[in-house]
Image (spheres, grey):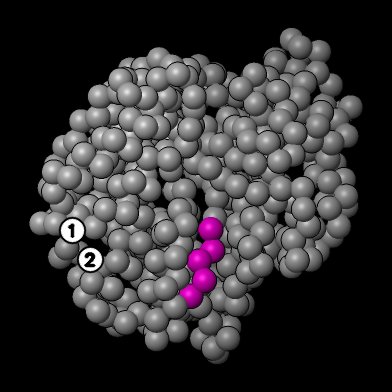
Amino acid sequence: MSLYTRLVSSALFPLHERMKGHASVQLRRELERTQWLGRDEIGRLQGDRLRRFLEEIGRRVPYYRDMFARIGFDPRAVRSAADLAALPLLDKRTIRAAGDSLRAVDAGKLSRYNTGGSSGEPLVFYIGKGRRTHDVAAKWRATRWWGVDIGDREIVAWGSPIELGAQDWMRLSRDRLLRSTLLPAFEMSAANLDRFVDEIVRVRPAMVFGYPSSLAMIAAHAKQRRVDLSHLGVKVAFVTSERLYDHQRESISSVFGSPVANGYGGRDAGFIAHECPHGGMHLSAEHIVVEIVDGEGQPAPTGAAGEIVVTHMATADFPFVRYRTGDIGILDGAACPCGRGLPMLKEIQGRSTDFVVAEDGTVMHGLALIYTIRDLPGVERFRIVQHAVDNVEVEVVANASFHRDDEQTIRESFRKRLGAGVRVDISKVLDIAPEKSGKYRYVVSHVVNGRATTH
């Protein structure tokens, strides 16, 4: 660790956090202690905190006070995360309907946030200092797993309008002090990609951070330009907010000459899980309860895929209890070789809308379709949109080597998987725009339970 990084991580950034009223330094130290507890000890710690959290929101939050009374739920009887099954699941529609009743009566000033709406359901919600403190501390802990720290040179390839719209002089000054350089990766044009590659070479970052799609595009562009990024000293590439595909991990790792660390979370659900150098996708279990539920909303057994449901215990000012993320995942019952007792996710398979439905009702992940297109040399970028069970559209940014035979290959492959009667429309486009959040999605399905949804 350089002297400058030591100064930033031990003095300047803690001062910055203290001035904002965040106890992130103390919490990070606590998290670095509790991560080494055994899984049973962490489970007991989580259960105690869950009970206190539910008691608190039962007093302070009208929505939960009324709901607990209505269903006869006594938070004082809670002993473990399994007791959450007595409470209903929470979805975006319910949150919107609840409105201010989800705000604690004594919450004080909260910050307004919203999701990007990539699922078709944007959500407005509020966050207090406790939640922001946890997000900073949990991310900080995970960053240090990889031998880097706040103050090391960092490139952030990001496209969220929230971050891009907040680049006032104070934010820019802070980023310069922390040696963090933001690349506005909302528009991945050839000219911007040239600039991004040149900036990475100039900065020589110790770490890079961004959407998997953004870093993969930068990596592919650098490789095309024959610009060597592997000698710059990048120790780790952090990715988050999208599903990380194997081919993206391989490309990013190869070009940057570093391992890729996957992260999972969101503004609505918090900093849920992060990958350690041994490959374990560790949950932030000290303050977040993760459940996997089946299609009926019932707890799924360990090792079975289901929807990821989150209860964040640092959100008492505007709490989400058993919040349906819309993501599909699998819990891992194994122990990680790193020795941390934090439970793990085995897989994060993506959003429920990343799955497509065949003519016979079979539900399959979009990967079944992605590989066919990805392996065609004439395809530079693509997106698959399932409008109905019998209609799939493929948008393709193609180069000169893309031929009619490739179109036939796509159609035959898709019909083999989805059904002979499926119409496959192929549209050649000049560009594929990201979602409003800046994320790129390879697969978008508007089919739920065999029926097309409005969009």
Identify the mark at residue 193; answer none if there is no mark: 2
Q: Look at label 1 and name its amino acid.
A: Ser
Label 1 close to label 2 by CB (< 8 Å): yes
Does residue 72 appear anywhere in the picture? Answer: yes
x and y percentages locating residue 396 in the rendered image: 20, 44
Position of residue 78 measured from the top left corner of the image (x, y, whole percent): 85, 30
Numbered disc 2: secondary structure = helix
Q: Is 235 displayed left or right of 288 in the figure?
A: left
Q: What stretch is highlighted in magenta?
A: 258-262
In the picture, which quadrant includes the C terminus?
top left
Residue 27 rendering spot, x and y as whole percentages:
70, 60
Q: Main secondary structure of the magenta part?
A: strand
Question: Label 2 sits on what residue type?
Answer: Leu
Q: How far apart are marks 1 and 2 (CA)?
A: 6 Å
Residue occupied by mark 1: 189
Q: Is residue 278 above or below residue 272?
A: below
Can you tell which quarter of the image residue 225 is in?
Answer: bottom left
